[in-house]
Image (spheres, grey):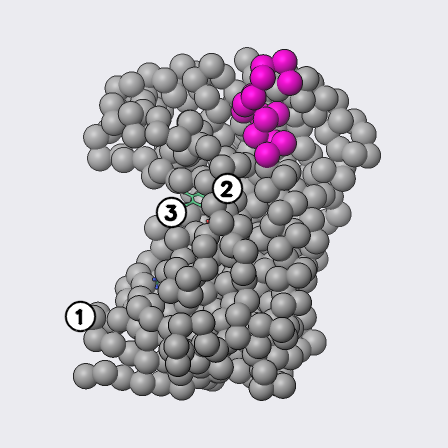
Amino acid sequence: MAEELDTDVCVVGAGPAGLALSLMMLRSGFRVALVERSPGFRREFHGELLQPGGQRVLDDLGVLTAAAARGAASLRGVQVLERGQVLLDLDYGRLPAPYDHLLALPQAHVLKELLAACRSLPGFVALDGHRIAALVEKRPGSPCRGAVLHGPGRVPVTVRASVVVGADGRFSRTRALAGIDAGRCGCFPHEVLWLSLRAPRRAAGRVRVHRGPEGVVLVHDSHPDRVRLAWTLPQGRTAAAAGGLRRLRRELAGMLPEFADLLYAQLGPGDAPVVLDGSAAHAREWVRDGLVLLGESAHAHGPVGAQGIGLALQDAAVLHPVLVAALHAQEPTAQRLAAYQERRAPVASAVHRMQAVQVRAVFGDGPRPAGALLRARATGLAVRTPFGARLTRRIAHGHDPAGVRTDLFTVLPAHRGRRH
Ligand SMILES: Cc1cc2nc3c(=O)[nH]c(=O)nc-3n(C[C@H](O)[C@H](O)[C@H](O)COP(=O)(O)OP(=O)(O)OC[C@H]3O[C@@H](n4cnc5c(N)ncnc54)[C@H](O)[C@@H]3O)c2cc1C
């Protein structure tokens, strides 16, 4: 039987962006229906490197300490190496405490804490196992008044809401239903193949990016007693590399001799690597009357510099006061919501530009001498100069750091501890 419910905000997608925004809106006294396609809010591997800018947003929400207590690895910074020589060294120890490190924090830990905090508040409805199927609008393009979902067994549920937030990731169905183009650009023509290995007593305390003739492999400690490897290959090559286990082990062991024993001992036929399509995108429209795109549904990035989670959390922090004001005025129009896009779209573009430079520097794409020159300059600059400190700050905190407007909270959170 068809169901109906009324709410203030219908958030589609329970990733970092959707859950963080849900919690902010609930604490500001609004009702939220959160829609997530996976039953039980299960999270597939979606990366875990959390930049200081994202840590700050979670800390403002009072969930960082509890999420990290579920298990995390603290990392001092990022090094890029070629044949054992350090080309680039971003030392996060130069940043002000407490956000002076990267965290390898499984997203499942973050999302569980955010969800638990949402569940503790009145006005929250969790619709897991539901997918968005249509927007509620009089005719295509007229103001959005909610969403039609398909629940288990394709039972339709109509959620009537003042505003629908599409936080359903880089392949956003909400965006497609609104007829908004993803705005894909070819800034990162690579795919990334992810693996995890048990590695007791091998912690390096840093993210290490190894450049070699077979590509670029990122390695970082991961909780508990593991390492994660991310091998970046040109688009289309990952399928071939992942297809042959022997070849995969041999090529990775060639690039990472220090992990050869683990690769040969642990990598078996059941360990299919996760492949990430790292293509970048920037939707032209992020807001319409009664509709907002948030996080990766508005702008997607390649994996260089681990920006996605932090950007998604900061987007939520910037949208929150804009949405609160629009809902108080009972006018969630494109005009009122535009302040969010005006502040965040330039940030997304700046990250695309920064990643394009990083790709050329680290991956050596483009003419070889240019890549070599960039690498040489990047090394000197990042290690020694104030520019290096600025670059580290920018990668760590983002181009426009954003904190949570806790002054707008009317429902006080249970105290869960904050980092000092
Ligand atoms: C393998 C991999 C590794 C990564 N590593 C890192 C990293 O180390 N650091 C980093 O910062 N970023 C990393 N990223 C990127 C990061 O995961 C994203 O930038 C971030 O999760 C974006 O958050 P989001 O909330 O916008 O979207 P998502 O996290 O993608 O969340 C979208 C949610 O919407 C749900 N959904 C999708 N379609 C529907 C639908 N039709 N109806 C209802 N729900 C739907 C999905 O199930 C999902 O839960 C990685 C990504 C991948 C895939």
Q: Amino acid at mark 1?
A: Gly
Residue 258 in view: no
Q: Quadrant of the C terminus?
A: bottom right
Q: Which residue is mark 3?
A: 45
Q: Mark 1 vs mark 2: give the one in front.
A: 2
* Residues shaded magenta: 356-370
Percent x, y of residue 369: 63, 13
User: Does the segment drawn in magenta span residue 279?
Assistant: no
Asked whether, in this view, residue 160 is left or right of residue 284, the answer is left
User: Does the segment drawn in magenta span residue 361?
Assistant: yes
Residue under the image location 63 percent in, 31 percent down: 357
Q: Which residue is mark 1?
A: 153
Q: Which residue is mark 2?
A: 185
Q: Quadrant of residue 154?
A: bottom left
Q: Amino acid at mark 2?
A: Cys
Residue count near mark 1 (Cα–Cα under 10 Å), binned few <14, some 14–19, many ≥20 = few
Mark 3 residue CB less than 8 A from any atom of ligand 1: yes
